[in-house]
Image (spheres, grey):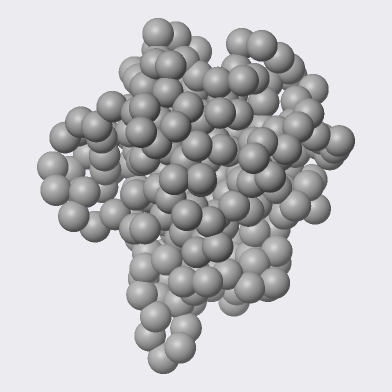
Amino acid sequence: MDAKELEKIQEKINRKIDRIFEKQVKKGIYDINKVAPIKDGITDFECYCDKNNAPSIMWILKEPWDKIVDDEPYGGGFNIPEIQKEENFINNISRAQQRIIYSMQCIRTKGAETYDDMNWYYDMPNRLKEIAYINLSKIPGYKSSDASLIERAKIWKDVVKEQIDKFDPDIIITANTYDLLIELGIIEDLSPSLEKEDNLVDVYKRKTGKILINAYHPSYPGVGVRPYIESLAKAVSKYFNKN
């Protein structure tokens, strides 16, 4: 898809997010004095659409975080892709985003399947800009999501489904969100998996013929940086253009 066309689609989706939020405020679900939507998606449309930079990759995480006030989520009202255009955005990246950057760098380094193989560049943070960065919920949540996330995600499921359909990534990486996506009916049940790579990620073939990789959340402390990165890089190397 053309980059300019995709940018217009994202703008349309952002307007849809605002409309949904307004309806939820009227229902009393959200307090406009406490929270506002956090937009997500693609930052560098040219890079995302560039076939020479294939595969296009979408990461689907749970929910964004901003502040906690009186033990409740607070804040929002910003746009992640716009923040990533700022010169000093790297100063505020999270641990999860750092692992996404490393994973993408390893995936993008030709011939690399290990942490030691990947090229290290000063502009590595720009790897965040070339992906579709998606949260299931578009409203600030807690630092650690609980079982109630399913109810918050239901509000935004049509938006997430549209992001998946319209952005049409070659590869989707679900960051501990696969089961939620199935339960919400956002994606089809893809079991059984093609293979479990390094016992860390499940690799699925979608009905479109494209690939979905089910991984741990990038900030999950039970998996080290090296094995996390390598499991994803190996899965992409093994299955992209071979599915």
The residue lying at 13 percent from left, 42 percent from top is 87
User: Is residue 200 left or right of 190 when viewed as pictured?
Assistant: left
Give above or below for 53 relative to 185: above
Give above or below for 35 relative to 42: below
The residue lying at 47 percent from left, 83 percent from top is 72
Image quarter where the C terminus lies is top right
**Residue 187 coordinates in the image, percent (x, y):** 75, 38
**Residue 141 coordinates in the image, percent (x, y):** 50, 70
The residue lying at 47 percent from left, 40 percent from top is 229
Give above or below for 111 relative to 93: above
Residue farthest to the left? 87
Foreground residue, 155 or 125? 125
User: Is residue 220 left or right of 186 when viewed as pictured?
Assistant: left
Res 115 visible:
yes
User: Is residue 235 left or right of 188 when viewed as pictured?
Assistant: left
Foreground residue, 38 or 215? 215
- Tell me which corner region of the image, top left, top right, bottom left or bottom right, holds residue 168: top right
Foreground residue, 202 or 223? 223
**Residue 195 coordinates in the image, percent (x, y):** 76, 32
Res 13 visible:
no
